[in-house]
Amino acid sequence: MTDYLFSPAVLVYVGLAFQALGFLARDELWLRFLILLGTCFYLSYYCTISNEPLFEAILASGILGAINLGMIIVLIFERTTFTMSEERAKIYRSFPTLNPGQFRKVMRAGVAKEGDPGTVLVTDGAPLDRLILVTSGQIKIAKGNKEYFADASAFIGEVSFLQRGNASATVSISETAKYMEWKHNELREMMRKSPAMNNALIALFGAELAGKVKNAMPVDVRQASGTA
């Protein structure tokens, strides 16, 4: 019995235990990590079970292990921000409901632009087919006889995106600004393909709208422009 406990056969059971735990894991990263550990024990078994290593089994398990390791690296990359530039990391703070991987996918679908003071981004009542995020500078939001001023990290057009309606205010640049644009149809397609992305963006826009309602401070146009 003692000899059996220290024999290469035990490696199979240890590998099986790790892989079984992996299949029970809900998190994909843990699943792949535990499966990889199990594969390592199987490889050890194939190398020690006989005088001649089982090269075919080693090759097959090694290839599967390498693929799994590659996917683990991809998952870690998607869940961390260490490869982001300072500017990109700053923009990421405007997407608190998205993980880094989801954020990178959203950014790949967007277009970076820059506008001068006076540039009109959105016109009240006009059809709107894009979502905008101001990343630097300042914008002016006009609705009726009221004006609001917002600095960077302000979304524009999330109401239109959610309701598939026209713009609900006129938005123009008051200080030279940088901003990102996303086509509505591209965002919706991204959300359709990924329920997790759909939930994350819906939560983001809901929080954004709630924040705007909470912090809204209507100002008379004449007061905002400095006229009597």
Image (cartoon, rainbow, N blue to C red):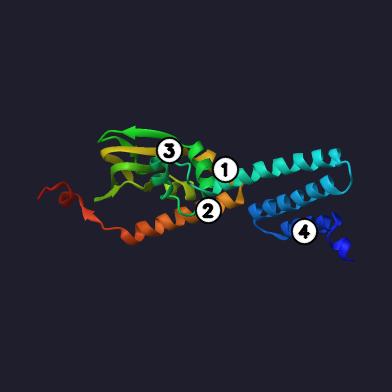
How would you rate the neighbour count of disc 3 (Cα within 10 Å): few for under 14, some for 14-19, many for 20 or more? some
Query: Residue 148 at what x, y percent from top left?
Result: 27, 51
Residue carrying label 1: 190
Residue drawn 20% across the image and 49% down it:
221
Q: Position of residue 212 (x, y in %)?
A: 35, 56
User: Between marks 2 and 3, how big is the CA–CA gap?
Assistant: 18 Å
For marks 3 and 4, the one nearer the N-term is 4
Regarding mark 2 in the picture, which secondary structure is present there? helix
What's the residue type where badge 4 is placed? Answer: Ala
Q: Nearer the viewer, mark 3 or mark 4?
A: 4
- Label 2 vs label 4: CA separation? 31 Å
Mark 1 in CB contact with mark 2 (< 8 angstroms)? no
Depth check: give the residue in front, 31 or 110: 31
Spatial CA span between label 1 and label 2: 12 Å
Quadrant of the snapshot with the N terminus: bottom right
Question: Are the two marked residues, 3 and 4, in contact with CB atoms closer than 8 angstroms?
Answer: no
Q: Residue furthest bottom?
A: 1
| Residue type indicated by callout 2 | Ala
Return the residue nearer the eye: 218 or 181.
Answer: 181
Report crowding for label 1: few under 14, some 14 to 19, many 20 or more residues within 10 A (C-alpha).
some
Q: Earlier in the sequence, mark 2 or mark 4?
A: 4
Q: Quadrant of residue 13?
A: bottom right
Query: Residue 104: x and y, percent?
Result: 51, 42
N-term-proximal mark, 1 vs 2: 1
Q: Tell me, for residue 181, which label it has, or none.
A: 3
